Amino acid sequence: MRNIKVDGDRLWASLMEMAKIGATEKGGVCRLALTDVDKAARDLFVRWCEEAGCSVSIDRMGNIFARRAGRDDTLPPVMTGSHIDSQPTGGKFDGIYGVLAGLEVIRTLNDLGYETDAPIEVSAWTNEEGSRFAPAMIASGVFGGAFTLEEGLASADVDGKTIGEELERIGYAGEMECGGRAVGAFLEAHIEQGPILEAEEKTIGIVQGVQGISWFDVTVTGMESHAGTTPMERRRDAMVGAAKLVAEIDRLAHENGPDARSTVGVMRVSPNSRNVIPGSVYFSADLRHPDAEVLAAMTAEAGLHAEAIARDGGLEIEFQEIWHSPPVKFAESCVGAVQGAAEALGYASRPITSGAGHDAVYVSRVAPTGMIFIPCEDGISHNEIEAATQADVAAGCDVLLNAMVALATQDEGEQPDS
Ligand SMILES: [Zn+2]
């Protein structure tokens, strides 16, 4: 593979220009999906893509696809992209980095006169953040078949305005079918949104997949009685049972390696009175792991602890899974292309698992998929102070460029020297 490089200054300038749209006083961005601000950012992106010679199409969920033809334009495209929308107090890089990195790949290929066999496409997915319309990643979800088009268009904000209505209003209700076409490969470049790359001084995270998530509702039932008159051995204290189970759930993640996570974030005690032994405690549990088998084993073990604690304490414990998002393992072809590009370019890299959801999760249902992470300052994201360095931004885009060229080109043939 040739080590071709993007124009890091041009990419940075585009990011900073785009960050003016929806800019906040604290240096971040507020660009909620399908608002006038989102429309302005979409319009700018589309104009830049057209100026780069791309043909632009919009699908029925308002997803934007900018296409640079391949030598064999009948081949399925090699695609990259992310999202333009942000959180209400979002940063200048989350999402938009992956979109503008894709544009920079096309601008660089144009500069070099480089022809890929397969066409290259840059996508911008509608409403990734889930801040205005639930759920998150709804439009890449329709593309990947996780939701129907009707579900996607009907999702409403707090004022009752639907995605379908708002797409019409801002002029992004496209005609193209959402999904249902072949994609040769999909790569998404994104800031890590976590602290690992920065802490280990790595420039590139070669994303292996996205961790699986299981959510549980846990209800511990004992018996309410007087805090002063009930001897300790006669108590059926729901809080003590809950506390023991929370400790076991925490221990589970510590014992299942560095990729395991467990969190209890909600607890409700009844009757919630200082001098009454709690009769009932509800709490939430969130278990995560990138390996489906380990996540299932963690779930089973938590259930066994619940049974044992219930038995010992004379309690009833309901331990119920209410939502499950299976782990995603990205395609070897895409992970390999990212790794090959990072190595050829000499950038320090490490394999990494995504702790957050991304559009790539849903696209991976219908196309071989991979992701590239770059460090972000102090691991902070979904915050106006979110920051990344120009060098890292450029390096991630260099990796994207070379990985896409590798995926889109069978035989390099005659190419201009770079
Ligand atoms: Zn994002």
Image (cartoon, rainbow, N blue to C red):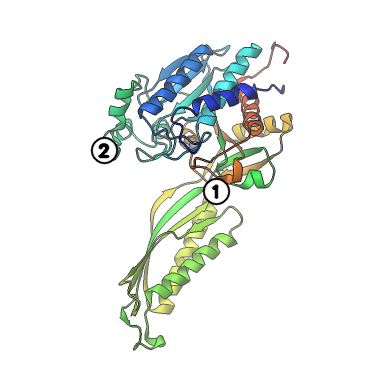
- CB atoms of marks 2 and 1 within 8 Å: no
In the image, which disc is placed on residue 346? none
* Residue 301 falls left or right of residue 126: right
Callout 2: helix, strand or loop? loop
Question: Please, which residue is most extreme toward the front here?
Answer: 25
Instruction: Give, as a three-letter code, the residue at label 2.
Output: Asp
Q: Which of marks 2 and 1 is in front?
A: 2
Q: Tag 2: Cα neighbours inside 10 Å, few (<14), some, or many (≥20)?
A: few
Image quadrant assignment for residue 229: bottom left
Q: Position of residue 159 (x, y in %)?
A: 26, 38
Q: Is residue 337 above or below residue 223?
A: above
Q: In this view, does 290 lie above or below 185?
A: below
Residue 166 at least partly seen: yes
Q: Nearer the viewer, residue 119 or 136?
A: 136
Q: Where is residue 110 in the image (x, y as percent from the top left)?
A: 60, 13
Residue under the point 45% across and 60% down: 264
Callout 1: helix, strand or loop? loop
The N terminus: image quadrant: top right
Q: Return the disc, 2 or 1, that comes first in the chain's sequence.
A: 2
Q: Name the residue under label 1.
A: 290
Residue under the point 62% across and 18% down: 108
Instruction: Give, as a three-letter code, the residue at label 1.
Output: Pro
The C terminus: image quadrant: top right
Total count of labels: 2
Q: Mark 2 points at which residue?
A: 159
Q: Where is residue 172 in the image (x, y as percent from the top left)?
A: 36, 22
Q: Nearer the viewer, residue 192 or 137?
A: 192
Q: Position of residue 258 (x, y in %)?
A: 61, 54
Image quadrant assignment for residue 272: bottom left
Residue under the point 49% across and 39% down: 26
* Residue 280 falls left or right of residue 251: left
Image quadrant assignment for residue 106: top right
